[in-house]
């Protein structure tokens, strides 16, 4: 049962739009992905870590952020999240830890075929403290829910 979760339909490529509050950047090829260990997006205001962790962000302090997700059905919600220094986080955790404030860059430059700097990969930290639901293309869903595919998640979660 979806309860109070809102349904966000996706485009023909299974993407939705994420707009970053700090930069106003519209990431048109965004997706939810429980297989990524971090949030992955391009943000020129966040410094990346030195090698070998250069795919991660390393801000000087915990950095609160916000983004607005918009589905193809125009459903919107604001997601508050924070990004912390990956080098510190990884040095202070076990190798198998899941870390809610871990984030990294997906590169810079132009969007190409929905890949790269035009996406926000809502990885595993997105799932913490939130009910997340999915539908599968071509499968039957109840009549009061949009046709598949879609993502749904509970609204109102605030990052502690």
Image: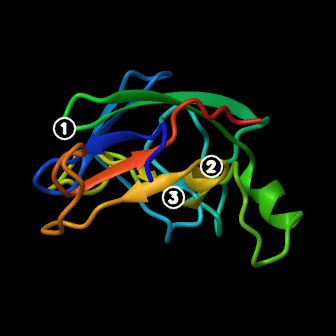
Mark nearer the viewer, 2 or 3: 3
Q: Residues within 10 Å of mark 2 (few under 14, many from 20)?
A: many
CA separation, marks 2 and 3?
A: 14 Å
Mark closest to the chain's N terminus, 3 or 1: 1
CA separation, marks 2 and 1?
A: 29 Å
Image coordinates of residue 41 in percent, x first then y, are 45, 47
Which residue shows up at 22% across the image and 59% down it?
141
The image quarter containing residue 144 is top left
CA separation, marks 3 and 1?
A: 20 Å
**Labelled pair 3, 1 in contact (Cβ < 8 Å):** no
Q: Residues within 10 Å of mark 3 (few under 14, many from 20)?
A: many
Q: Residues within 10 Å of mark 1 (few under 14, many from 20)?
A: some
- Judge left or right: residue 33 versus residue 13: right
Please give the residue where the numbered disc 3 appears in the rendered image: 123
Image coordinates of residue 119 in percent, x first then y, are 33, 48
Per the image, label 1 sits on a secondary structure element best described as: loop
Per the image, label 3 sits on a secondary structure element best described as: loop
Please give the residue where the numbered disc 1 appears in the rendered image: 72
- Report the front residue among 60 and 67: 67
- Judge left or right: residue 127 versus residue 68: right
- As drawn, the residue found furthest toward the front would be 143
Model colouring: rainbow
Instruction: Return the mark for residue 57.
Output: 2
Mark nearer the viewer, 3 or 1: 1
Mark closest to the chain's N terminus, 2 or 1: 2
**Labelled pair 2, 3 in contact (Cβ < 8 Å):** no
Which residue shows up at 18% across the image and 64% down it?
140
């Amino acid at each position: 049962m979806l309860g109070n979760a809102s349904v966000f339909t996706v485009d023909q490529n299974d993407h939705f739009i994420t707009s970053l509050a700090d930069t106003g950047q519209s990431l048109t090829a965004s997706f939810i992905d429980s297989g990524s260990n971090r949030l992955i997006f391009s943000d020129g205001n966040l410094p990346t870590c030195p090698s070998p962790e250069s795919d991660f962000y390393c801000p000087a302090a915990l950095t609160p952020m916000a983004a607005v997700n918009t589905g193809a059905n125009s459903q919107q919600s604001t997601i508050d999240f924070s990004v912390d220094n990956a080098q510190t986080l990884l040095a202070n955790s076990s190798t198998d830890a899941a870390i809610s404030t871990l984030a990294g860059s997906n590169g810079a430059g132009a969007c190409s075929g929905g890949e790269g700097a035009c996406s926000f990969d809502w990885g595993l930290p997105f799932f913490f403290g939130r009910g997340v639901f999915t539908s599968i293309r071509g499968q039957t869903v109840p009549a009061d829910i949009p046709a598949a595919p879609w993502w749904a998640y509970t609204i109102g979660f605030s990052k502690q």
